[in-house]
Image (tube, rainbow, N blue to C red):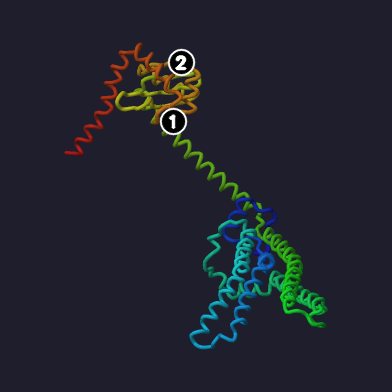
Amino acid sequence: MADDDKDSKTEQATAKHLQDALEKGQFAKSPEVGLVLVLIAALGAFSTTTGTAARELAGFATHIFGQLANIRLQLDTVPTELHDALIIVAKILAPILGACALAGLLAGGLQSGFALTPSAIGLKFEALDFSNGWQRIISKNSFIHAGVDLLKVIAIGLVLWTCAKGLFQDPLFTAPVEAAYLGLYMNRATMSFLSRLVLALGVIATISYWYEFMKSRNDLKMSRQEIKDETKSAEGDALTKGAMRRMARRLLQKQMLKQVPMADVIVTNPTHYAVALRYERGKDQAPVVLAKGENVFARRIKALAAEHGVPMVENKPVARMLYALGKVDEPIPGELYQVVAEILAMVYRTHKYYFFRLRSRRAEASAPTRSHGLSEAA
């Protein structure tokens, strides 16, 4: 059954499936990539800090050998000298170790796409199953990893052999040389070994990562049924979110329609937009948008406004700007203060009786709130 299920997975993984696998830590990863980057970091740090390290060692050696006749090896002097030596060693090794640590983090980030995979951390009890562990040991994957390890051993051996063959021909082994030449020889030998090792392991890391990448893509393949199920689930989520948005929009429209009878004026397009505004002196610092709508909902706002006698003013540019920039239950934008003030002033002059009724309507609307507050206080 397992083989049949595997054979049925013939489709490439979807973006969601790949993202889910990445969060679980299922992505192509090769330890050889990290090894090569660490070696490159060590090579770079060593090449840039050689001069500083040589000066530190030379200064320490000069101090030791210059004061050798005066140094007394006692219990109270040995810790001091060891402390100075450790500080020198730390100064030399710190840049190299720091570069290697950063390279290790960079290797992990490059292979995971710098994505956090918290679900990959933790104890997995299925990994403790002896039968599954034995299958992993004798699997095709384990033999390939063993082959990669063998290639690394061969590469390191060849690099050591070629470096030694060339370095043993140095005049250091056949003729007298100055003491300073020994440092130059060691630096050249180290750089030669590291650079050749990086090249050899770089080829192996490329092959290893290519295999892991292809294996990961093949393991993450999906069956057609899985793709259908994922698509159906995604569509279901989209339908649920769409229904929630529609419900929220209906609730907002219902709330806006309740506010229309309390408006001072309705600014219209006249057919496409309608915006209801309120301005109560002493309460509102600026006119407030009570409701806004376009097309069908704009017609509902205007019908309700006509039913309650709310004045309507046709002003196409102002209606468009109020609809685009205004937010419900918030003051209008500052750039519209002047033009809206002119509209309100005109409405106040021509609809005095309406505003007399509006004050009564607002007082009646706020009366239940006051009585409820008084009952709670009692």
**Residue 234 placed where, x, y %?**
57, 46
**Residue 78 placed where, x, y %?**
53, 84
Quarter of the view holding residue 6: bottom right
Q: Is residue 377 above or below residue 118?
A: above
Q: Are marks 2 and 1 in contact (CB under 8 Å)?
A: no
- Residue identifier under label 1: 327
As measured in the structure, the alpha-carbon distance from the residue carrying label 2 to the one carrying label 1 is: 20 Å
The kind of residue on which mark 2 rests is Glu
Judged from the image, the secondary structure of the residue bearing numbered disc 2 is: strand
In this orientation, does residue 5 appear? no
Quarter of the view holding residue 170: bottom right
Quarter of the view holding residue 264: top left
**Residue 108 placed where, x, y %?**
62, 62
With 40 as the anchor, is 323 left or right in this view?
A: left
Quadrant where the C terminus sits is top left
> Which of the labelled discs sits on residue 314, or is there none?
2
Taking the view exactly as shown, the residue that stands out farthest to the top is: 350
Along the line of sight, the residue nearer the viewer: 171 or 64: 64
